[in-house]
Image: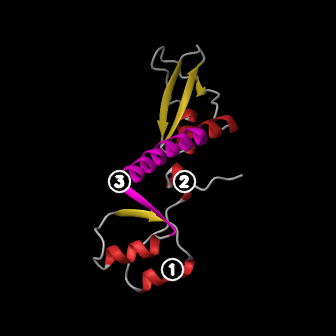
Amino acid sequence: MIRYTLICDHDHEFEGWFSSSSDYDDQAKSGLLTCPICESVNVEKAIMAPAIKTARKVEARSEKAKMAMNTVAAKIRDEISKNCEDVGDRFAEEARAIHYGEKVARGIYGSTTPEESASLSEEGIEAHPLPDILVPEKSKPKLN
């Protein structure tokens, strides 16, 4: 369906819905279009401005999405900080100890080498990289 804003020769504006643009053309040629206000048959399409995405609108939407993501990331970082222990570069060692029941099960995060990560996976120990945006602030290395 196509919606057109229509206008009569007395400047009354109203909407018309058509199955296609040719459907509008056929009805207009046949005199089937009439103004619902004054019943004039001199009806044509009004000039319409298309909905165009401006750079400003796109930028505003992008900024809004970025703010929402940062808010969610901050909440996740806070939960990780409150509920998990930063074990630093002892991550693989701690993950193994928890997996094999040598230490109490708890949430941990830290760092590991690619080789250690592959070794954990081979042993059936689930460990997933934590995206940098989710790492609690106190755990991020300081850049000089």
Residue 81 location in percent, x, y? 42, 51
Q: Which mark is first along the chain, 3 or 2?
A: 3
Which residue is at 51% across, 80% downward?
116
The residue that label 3 is drawn on is: 83
Question: 110 or 10: which is nearer to us?
Answer: 110
The stretch in magenta equals 61-89
Callout 1 crowding tier (Cα within 10 Å): few <14, some 14–19, many ≥20? some
Q: Which mark is first along the chain, 1 or 2?
A: 1
Q: Main secondary structure of the magenta part?
A: helix
Q: Which mark is residue 116?
A: 1
Three-letter amino acid code of the residue under disc 2: Ile
Q: Of tags 2 and 1, which is closer to the observer?
A: 1
Q: Is residue 16 above or below residue 108?
A: above
Which residue is at 55% across, 82% downward?
115
Q: Is residue 53 above or below residue 99?
A: above
Q: Which mark is first along the chain, 3 or 1?
A: 3
Per the image, label 1 sits on a secondary structure element best described as: helix
Per the image, label 2 sits on a secondary structure element best described as: helix
Q: Is residue 34 above or below residue 26?
A: above
Residue 52 visible (yes or no) = no
The residue that label 2 is drawn on is: 133
How far separated are the C-alphas under marks 2 and 1?
Answer: 22 Å
Per the image, label 3 sits on a secondary structure element best described as: helix
Which residue is at 44% across, 80% downward?
120
Three-letter amino acid code of the residue under disc 3: Asn
